[in-house]
Amino acid sequence: MKYEFLEIESKWQDIWEKEKPFRAINGSDKPKFFALIEFPYPSGEGLHVGHPRPFTAMDIVSRKRRKQGYNVLFPIGFDAFGLPTENYAIKNKMHPADVTRDNIKRFTEQLKMLGYGFDWDRCVDTTDPDYYKWTQWIFLKMFEQGLAYKALIPVNWCTSCHCVLANEEVVEGVCERCGSEVVRREKSQWMLRITQYAQRLVDDLDLVDYPDRVKSQQRNWIGRSVGAEIDFKTTTGDTLRVYTTRPDTIYGATYMVISPEHNLLKNWTVENSDEVKAYQDAAAKKTDFERTELVRVKTGVEIKGICAINPATNEEIPIFISDYVLASYGTGAIMAVPGHDQRDWEFAKQFDLPIVEVVAGGDIEKEAYEDCDEGIMVNSGILDGLSVEEAIAKITDWLRDENLGEEKVNFKLRDWVFSRQRYWGEPIPIVFCEKCGYVAIPESELPLVLPNVEKYETTETGESPLAAMEEWLEASCPKCGGPAQRETDTMPQWAGSSWYYLRYTDSDNSDTLASREALEYWTPVDWYNGGMEHTTLHLLYSRFWHKFLYDIGVVPTVEPYAKRTSQGMILAEDGQKMSKSRGNVINPDDIIKEFGTDTMRLYIMFIGDFEKTAPWSQRAVRGCKRFLDRLWNLSWELLDGTDEISETHELAVHKAIKKVGNDIEILKFNTAIATLMALVNDFYDKAPSRGDVKVLLSLLSPFAPHIAEELWKLQGFEGYAAASPWPEYEESKTQEAQREIAVQIGGKLRGTVVVDMDIEDDTVVEIVTNDEKIKNIIDGKEIVRTIVVKNKLVNLILK
RNA sequence: GCCGCCGUGGUGGAAUUAGGUAGACACAAGGGACUUAAAAUCCCUCGAUAGAAAUAUCGUGCCGGUUCGAUUCCGGCUGGCGGCACCA
C-alpha cells in the first residue's frame, strides 16, 4: 500500500472537523493549559511559510499537553482591521468588509489544511461588532479613568498612509508598514496614558518568564532612568527646571540649553529675539529624521540678555536654545556639563564655552569624561573628594534641603497616540459637545457600528473618511442633549489585539468581555509564542491594557502571559527576506500539494534552531518526506510482536521518550525530530515490535498528526494516537549497561574502552592501563596523575 | 555610541544546561545493488593533510589566559545580525 498523503490528510481533517477533538472545555476539573499564538492578519496573499513555524510549534506543545491530560485551550482568530485591507479595497474598488470576509475564508481553509488542533468554535474576528463592542468598552473605561485623553501634539504623520503613527510604528524615520517618509505635524489626537504604567511595566517583567532579549528590549524601550530635577533661577526672575541623571556634576554646569519648541521663560526680554525666532522656525520644519539621523553638528543660538544662575556655584551662565535638546523628554531643558557629557562637550567646543572638570580621571581636553564610575569629585565645593556615588547622594540631599530640586525618575516611553485617520478600524465611541466637551457615548449604545460609506479613501488633509459623512457626524450630547459631533478617527490596529486572548476564554459572551469564571480558570496564558517584532508594540500594549483591566477588577491576574517565546524568521533560499517584490516567496499550499502537510510541518520544525532565523531549502524538504515514507513502509502492515516495548529497542525507545519530551519543552523541535528519525533508522536495522512502533507513533503524533493517526489505526491500536497518553520512560532504562569511554593521555584522545556503567574508578583505571594499545603508550613512563570522570573518560598524565 | 545575540564540514545544523570522545540528524556529492533504462528504494563513503592500511598531525572566526582537558569559562580583537539612539 502506498503512502497516499493527500487522501490520508484530508480524511483525518474531516474527522477532526466533525468530531471536534480539540475543543476546550469551560468548567472542566482537569488542569488547564492555555497556549497562544499571535493571531494572523488575514492579508490578501494568504498564508506564507512564516506563519506555520510558530503555529506548528505551539500545536505540537498543545497536542503534547492534551496527551498529558490537560484541558487545552489553543485558539485562533483574525486581527482583521487595518491598513493593508483598506488599501487593497481601495485599489480593487471593493468594500473592506468584503475583502476581510474573503481573506478570512481563505486563511481558515489554509489553516485547516495544516492540520492545527485549534478550537475553531472560539474563533474571534476583531472586525465583528460583537467583538469590537468590547474593544470600545475598554476604551470607554480608560476614558472614564482619565487614561484616554485628547491632546494637541506633534505627531508622526505618514505621507503615504495619510495617517498618524505611534512612536512604536516609526522605524528609522520611516513608516514601519509602508516605508514612506514620516513628517511632523501638529494634530489633536486621542492618547492613551501608557506612561502611567511605565514603572509597573518595568517592574513586573520580574514576574514573567520571557526570554532575556525580550525583557531587555522592553526595558530599553521604556527607558527608565533615575536622576534629579533642579531649579536654576534666571537673571530676569524666571525659574528654569532641568532634569539630569548626574546631579553630582552640577559644579561643572557652565551653560544651559532649552529645546526650540519650548518657551520656558516668561520674562522674554531677549536682545536677539529675531535670531532666536528664526532658529525655532527652522527647527520646527525639520522632520524627526533630519533632527536625529543627519549630520550631528551642534547648532544653537544664545538667548542674549538673560542668564541663569548655577545654584551650586552662584555663577551666571549663558542660556542657549538648541535642537539637541528634546522638548518631549525630561523638562525640555538641561544644565550642560561639557566636561562629562559628550554632546555638551561638542556644543561647548562649537560655541567656545568653558569646560570644567568636576570628576578627575579622564582627559577633558580630548573628550568628555562620561564613564566616571571610579572618578573622584574635584572643583566641586562641598562634593570635593567624594566618589560619584557619594556625591549624587549628598547633592540630592542638599538640593532637597535647599528646596532647589528633588530626586526624579524619568522614562523614554511616551503616551500612545491612539487615533487613526482611516476608515477600517473601530470607531472611537466619543462625541464632542460645544458645551460639555468630549463625552462618552453610553455603554448601552455599544457597539458603535462602523457605518457603510460611499468613499473610504484617505484624504490629504488628514481627515478620516468618516468626517465626510454627515449622518455619522451629527449626534446629540449624552450629557446635555444638545447637538454634538461624533469622533471621526478610528482606533489603531493594535487595539483589537490588545485583549483578544481574553475573549477566547468565553468567546460567545454577550454580557461581558468574558465571564469572571472563565477568566479565573483560563488566565493567565500559560505559553505565548510570537515574533520579536511585536516586543515593543503588541506585547507592550497588551501588557498595559491587561494591567488596566486588572486595576478595574475585570481580570484576575497582573500579567497576561506567564511565558513568552519567540521564533526566528524564515528566509528565502537565497538568504534574503521573502517578499513578493523579490519573487522568492514560498507558498505553503504548494509544499502541501507536493509533499503533504505532515512533511511541511516536520520540515518547518526541522529546519533549524526554532529561535533563530533559518533559510528555506526546497531540497531539504525531501528529507522529511523520505522519513515519513520510511516510517510508512515499515509499519503500514500489521507488525509482529507484543504491544510492549521490545527488549531489542528498549534502550533506544526509552531514551527517545525522554529526549523528545524534553526537547519539546525547550523548543528544540529540530533535535526531537532527529531523535525520531534515528529511531526509525534503528527499526530498519532491527525489526521493531508493535509496542515499539506504538510509542514511536505516539511521540510523532504532535509533529505529524495525520500519518500517526492513520498508522495507529492500521495497527489496530485503541482510540486515537492524539488521545493516547504521552508515553512515559523509566530513567533506569535510558541508561546503557555498558559504555564506551574515552581514554586520554595528557588530555589527548588515545583510544576508547568499553566498560560497565557506573563501575568503580579503580576498576576503570585497571582496565584502561591493561588495554594493549594504552599499555604500549604508557610503557616505560610513570603515571603521575589519573583523572576519572564517571562513565565519560579516563585521563592519564605521564612523566 | 549603548544594549542583546551569533561565528562549528560543500550546506542546514548537533554537542554549550554543569568544561570531558566535536560534527548527531538531514541535504548535497561520490560509489555500489536492483532495473532494458530512468525515477524511486536499499547499502557504503563523506572535516583537512599524509598513508595501501593501522595510524599520526591539524581542525569549532583570530590572539592570549585558566585547566590534566576549552566549541563550552575569562580577557582582548575581528566579522555578522537584531534592537535603541542628541533621552541629558
Image (cartoon, helix red, strand yellow):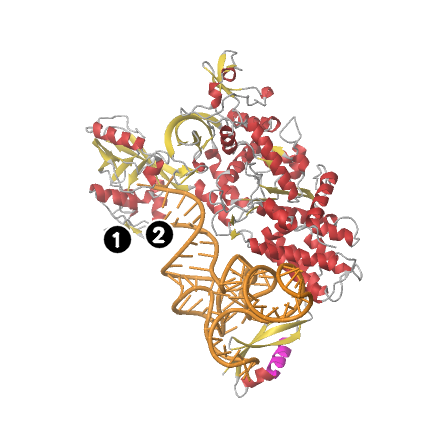
The answer to whether residue A21 is visible is no
**Residue A34 locus on image (x, y percent):** 64, 42
Identify the element where label 1 is drawn.
loop
Q: Where residue A373 is drawn, which disc sits there?
A: 2
**Residue B62 locus on image (x, y percent):** 40, 66
- Using the rendered view, name the quadrant where residue A762 is placed: bottom right
Foreground pick, A388 / A20:
A20
Taking the image as shown, residue A115 lies to the left or right of residue A91, namely right
Label 2 Cα crowd, 10 Å radius (few <14 / some 14-19 / many 20+): few
Q: Where residue A342 is drawn, which disc sits there?
A: none
User: Is A21 a magenta residue?
Assistant: no
Residue that badge 1 annotates: A363
Q: Residue at x 57, y 55 (%)?
A: A619
Q: Nearer the viewer, mark 1 or mark 2?
A: 1
User: Is A766 a magenta residue?
Assistant: yes
Residue type, mark 2 in image = Asp
Which quarter of the rendered picture does the N terminus of chain A lie within? bottom right
Question: From which residue to which does the magenta span run?
Answer: A760-771
Foreground pick, A157 / A399:
A157
Please tell me whether residue A706 is drawn above or below residue A186 in the rendered image. below
- The chain that hosts pointer 1 is A
Residue at far bottom of view = A780
